[in-house]
Image (spheres, rainbow, N blue to C red):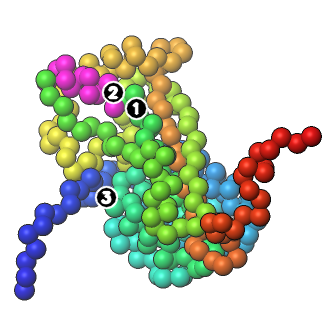
Amino acid sequence: MTQSNSPAAPRLTDRAALARHRARARRQGPALFLHQEAADEVQERLAEVNRAFTAPAIVTPFPEAWQAFPDALILPDAEDLGLGPGAHDLVIHALALHWADDPVGQLVQCRRALRPDGLFLGVLFGGRSLQELRAVLAEAESAVTGGLSPRVLPMAEIRDLGGLLQRAGFALPVADAVTRQVEYRGLPHLVRDLRAMGETNALAARHPAPMPAAMLAEAGRRYAAGYPAPEGRIRATVETIFLTGWAPHDSQQQPLRPGSAATRLADALRPRD
């Protein structure tokens, strides 16, 4: 047997730590308001499609937030999603794709699971999410310890995600975002909410030691000074990105072949009398 000497690709996520964080959230009572908002938005978008879906599947770490889809096959966001080829006319990847080491691989699995002209809807947190927390933790760690380590998950920018849909083979790809500000009494309350969402630091390259109390206090001071909200509160940005793509089918709108346009651009731009 031949052994490969090529190094393994670096991993973004410590999946075991992520599973522990999600299990802790379930034990203590998960904060699922962002999941429920995403589920409501998905329902609204599906109503606009005006099609009855008979074989949906949902990839989610928190099935309880998606009870409005009682007939859906619910699957965890494992590296191998376990979706049958061509088994579904709708696949929803729900607020887990931002933790994927291989997001294109996840999208490819979803596309292969769709029947022709089946619909994919992906929901994930985008790059503007927790930008305030990312900044103050970096500043506080540098000030207190003189070092810097990854504390907040790096999340994809919307401008890159449409390209990922194309790479995965989806037709008519669309990426759009909804951004909102959430207010908290202080940094400890924000951290408590992130813990209840199962969204605390599960990066493979995270610092192994707990955050020093002095660093947390310094981060809280910087947060309150730099990102204040009314009544002495702080604000946190949450960007939710929605991805839409279709499994290719001959009935879908197709781009024109080069040179097949019936009207020249120069004629279209010519002033009319």
Please name the residue shown 66% across and 79% down the image: 250
Please name the residue shown 47% across and 56% down the image: 163
User: Which residue sits furthest right?
Assistant: 273
| Residue denoted by label 2 | 135
| Residue denoted by label 1 | 131
Q: CA distance from mark 1 to mark 2?
A: 6 Å
Q: Is residue 140 magenta?
A: yes
Image coords of residue 60 (percent x, y): 46, 61
Q: CA distance from mark 3 to mark 1?
A: 21 Å
Q: Is residue 88 left or right of residue 95?
A: right
Q: Amino acid at mark 3?
A: Asp
Q: Regarding mark 1 in the picture, which secondary structure is present there?
A: helix
Q: Is residue 89 above or below residue 35?
A: below
Q: Is residue 256 above or below residue 151?
A: below
Q: Which mark is residue 84?
A: none
| Residue denoted by label 3 | 101
Q: Regarding mark 3 in the picture, which secondary structure is present there?
A: loop
The 10 Å Cα crowd at callout 3, few under 14, some 14 to 19, many 20 or more, is some
